Image (spheres, rainbow, N blue to C red):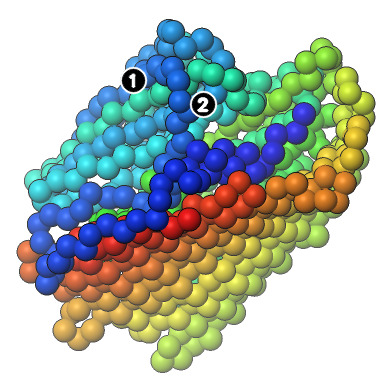
């Protein structure tokens, strides 16, 4: 059984398409500049669809974060909704007021990371926000009582007064059980032991560069001898790699997440965060070509590393979950890894000095892995091909009073499955873009103009004929200015931000467009 890579997008879309008519919110008159309060944070991304019928809710965590002490509790499965669910929805509700930085957080259930998130920066009067995520894929973990750990590391003192108050719930929906992995595994001392009848293996890595150092802005780092505040030996190219028993098994471009204090300008993010900032999506690797090796009942070494991080430097978090589908018709599935082809990593950065310094970076990598499994329904061959590319131009002046980046990352993956019946293929073409400039004038007015893009084109074919498709275009644009190096009430900040989220495909369409001015939501338009 092969689970469609389109399933998540189609499932979300099918619950929303046609449900909401085209509409536009009224446009209140924005103030001349930011005040002490603004609209609660929101995104244009679609809410998680909720099936009709019986449901059960469980509180997973409820805590106030003032420091770096994790919340620890116990989860018990719901009663009254069975143990096979059509959907499971996680919801985080948060509130904070005063003054506080953006903070990174996670939720673990039984050691499995079910959410990685970040927080908005608050207004003095206070804000509330929420995050929803479909966590049906973790149903195996949620069928048993588990330990829960949650942390949003925070600092509260006389200056940074914001206590982060959150509640996390799970809602379970009855009905026809969803197709979900049979097992959800974590690494033990860096090793993985899979069931001996595994027929599909997918690793997911919640890779994030963060922690307040330069790896939070890895896409802006420069090598010596370029004169810039953030340095990395090989420049800004990053690549998340996974190895099985020392052999390269998967490559991926990390998403260039911008947290809500990013680009030196929190006024860009007070209402609309950058794509994925509140719901950090994991990098996924289809390791099925390696299943024949993994199915021997032994522990195998699994390592995740980030190319380009200077030796000994921290700043990246890479927790790993492993999703496994089993062959119900056999207790043991044998097979072999038949081919791995690595074209090698190409990575170069060229520095050009001048009144405006310039760094041109190019990186690329291609990896193919093939293997077969002798399952209860015959021999099945899986081939995974992934091609990565990154180009960027970074320009800055002495003192970094002008700092600009234009960058594109592409991550193209094709998974082909050939066994009983016609061959099936899924292609996922991901494109991430960043185009921004920050300037600091002689009058200490700091302005940031920035566009971010998160795009994906997914297609499925069977015997060469297309059976499903989707196109995602999530684009954020912002332009914000404030007076730097003065007390908060003297910043005289102004800013316009916009996010348009479009998801089109064989299941229908979703299209929402948000605009804010000085923290006031002036447009909320839905199309389709």
- Looking at the picture, does residue 213 appear above or below residue 7? below
Please state the horizontal and vertical placement of residue 266, each as a whole percent of the image: 26, 61
Judged from the image, the secondary structure of the residue bearing numbered disc 2 is: strand
Q: Nearer the viewer, residue 57 or 306?
A: 57
Please state the horizontal and vertical placement of residue 178, each as a whole percent of the image: 60, 25
For residue 516, side relative to residue 231 (left or right) = left
Residue ID for mark 2: 87
Q: Nearer the viewer, residue 259 or 466?
A: 466
Please state the horizontal and vertical placement of residue 35, each as a whole percent of the image: 10, 61
Q: Residue at x 7, y 64 (%)?
A: 489
- Looking at the picture, does residue 26 appear above or below residue 122? below
Residue ID for mark 1: 59
Cα distance in 3D space between marks 2 and 1: 16 Å
Q: Answer whether residue 261 is visible to the viewer in this image.
A: no
Q: Residue furthest bottom?
A: 355
- Marks 2 and 1 in Cβ contact (< 8 Å): no
Please state the horizontal and vertical placement of residue 314, each as a whole percent of the image: 46, 48
Tell me the mark number nearer the camera, choosing from 2 and 1.
Answer: 2
Count neighbours of disc 2 (C-alpha within 10 A) and say few if under 14, some if 14 to 19, many if 20 or more.
many
Q: Answer whether residue 523 is visible to the viewer in this image.
A: yes
Q: Nearer the viewer, residue 416 or 73?
A: 416
């Amino acid at each position: 059984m092969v689970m469609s890579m389109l399933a998540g997008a189609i499932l979300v879309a099918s619950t929303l398409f046609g449900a909401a008519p085209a509409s536009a919110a009224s446009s209140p008159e924005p103030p001349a500049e930011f005040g002490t309060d603004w609209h609660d944070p929101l995104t244009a991304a679609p809410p998680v669809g909720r099936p009709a019928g019986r449901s059960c809710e469980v509180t997973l965590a409820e805590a106030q974060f003032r420091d770096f002490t994790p919340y620890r509790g116990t989860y018990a499965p719901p009663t009254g909704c069975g143990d096979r669910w059509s959907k499971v929805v996680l919801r985080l509700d948060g509130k904070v007021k005063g003054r506080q930085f953006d903070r990174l957080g996670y939720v673990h259930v039984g050691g499995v990371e079910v959410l990685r998130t970040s927080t908005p920066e608050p207004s003095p009067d206070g804000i509330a926000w929420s995050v929803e995520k479909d966590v049906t894929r973790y149903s195996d973990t949620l069928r048993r009582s588990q330990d829960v750990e949650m942390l949003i590391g925070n600092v509260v003192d006389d200056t940074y007064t914001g206590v982060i108050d959150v509640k996390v719930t799970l809602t379970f929906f009855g009905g026809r059980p969803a197709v979900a992995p049979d097992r959800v595994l974590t690494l033990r001392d860096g090793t993985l032991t899979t069931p001996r009848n595994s027929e599909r293996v997918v690793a997911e890595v919640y890779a994030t560069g963060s922690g307040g150092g330069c790896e939070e802005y890895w896409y802006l780092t420069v090598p010596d001898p370029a004169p810039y505040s953030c340095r990395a030996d090989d420049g800004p190219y990053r690549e998340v790699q996974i190895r099985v028993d020392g052999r390269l098994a998967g490559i991926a471009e990390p998403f260039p997440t911008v947290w809500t204090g990013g680009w030196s300008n929190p006024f860009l993010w007070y209402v609309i965060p950058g794509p994925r900032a509140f719901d950090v999506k994991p990098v996924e690797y289809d390791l099925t070509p390696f299943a024949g090796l993994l199915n021997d009942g032994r522990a195998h070494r699994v390592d995740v590393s980030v190319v380009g991080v200077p030796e000994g430097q921290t700043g990246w978090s890479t927790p790993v979950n492993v999703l496994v589908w089993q062959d119900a018709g056999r207790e043991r599935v044998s097979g072999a890894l038949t081919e791995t082809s690595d074209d090698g990593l190409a990575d170069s950065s060229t520095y050009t000095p001048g009144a405006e310094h310039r760094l041109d970076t190019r990186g690329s990598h291609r990896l193919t892995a093939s293997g077969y499994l002798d399952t209860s329904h015959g021999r099945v061959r899986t081939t995974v091909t992934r091609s990565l590319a990154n180009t960027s131009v970074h320009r800055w002046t002495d003192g970094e009073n002008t700092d600009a980046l234009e960058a594109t990352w592409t991550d193209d993956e094709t998974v082909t499955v050939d066994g009983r019946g016609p061959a099936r293929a899924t292609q996922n073409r991901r494109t991430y873009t960043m185009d921004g400039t920050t300037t600091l004038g002689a009058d200490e007015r700091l302005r940031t103009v920035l566009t971010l893009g998160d795009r994906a084109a997914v297609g499925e074919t069977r015997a060469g004929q297309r059976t499903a498709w989707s196109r995602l275009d999530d684009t954020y644009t912002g332009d914000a200015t404030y007076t730097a190096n003065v007390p908060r009430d003297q910043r005289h900040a102004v800013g316009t931000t916009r996010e348009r989220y479009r998801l089109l495909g064989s299941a229908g369409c979703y299209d929402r467009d948000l605009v804010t001015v000085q923290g006031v939501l002036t447009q909320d338009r839905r199309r389709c």
